[in-house]
Image: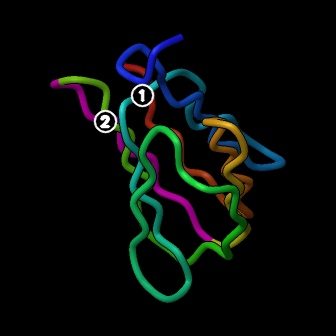
Amino acid sequence: MSGADRRLHVSVISPAAVGFTGEGDSVIIPAYDGQLGILVGHAPMMVLLGTGDVVIRDGDTEHRVPVSGGFMQVIDDEVSVLAEVVEVADAE
């Protein structure tokens, strides 16, 4: 798969809820010491989460998932956010 065709596979979960699972072009994470941006091809890493919105951008679409505590891991374009608390919007 060429670099232009690659995507991030993103999951945002807590023990009690699934906030998001799917693909995106970029992710912004509320790390404990500030925001962190993730793009395709990012180096492997693990970071402690703070409190704020995980923002998943997919073209013109933006998904926001409020989280608090936990950690985020990136390996091979897989972004796993394992939060203590994930707020899930009510279905309208």
Which residue shows up at 75% across the image and 49% down it?
14
Which quadrant of the structure image shows residue 71?
A: bottom right
Within-10-Å neighbours for mark 1: few <14, some 14–19, many 20+ = many
Magenta span: 60-68
Q: Residue furthest front?
A: 2
- Amino acid found under the numbered disc labelled 1: Gly
- Sequence-wise, the earlier of marks 1 and 2 is 1
Residue 55 in the image, given as x and y percentages of width and height: 37, 48
Kindly identify which numbered label has been placed on residue 24. 1
The mark total stands at: 2
Q: Please give left or right for residue 7 compared with residue 80 in the image.
A: left
Q: How is the image coloured?
A: rainbow
Whether the residues at callouts 1 and 2 have beta carbons within 8 Å, the answer is yes
* Principal secondary structure, stretch drawn in magenta: strand
**Please, is residue 79 above or below residue 85 in the view?**
above
Q: Please give left or right for residue 54 compared with residue 63 in the image.
A: right
**Please, is residue 60 above or below residue 42 in the view?**
above
**Which residue bears the numbered disc 2?**
57
> What is the C-alpha distance between the residues marked 1 and 2?
6 Å
Q: Is residue 16 magenta?
A: no
Residue 78 in the image, given as x and y percentages of width and height: 66, 36
Q: Quadrant of the C terminus?
A: top left
**Please, is residue 51 above or below residue 25 in the view?**
below
Q: Is residue 61 magenta?
A: yes
Within-10-Å neighbours for mark 2: few <14, some 14–19, many 20+ = some
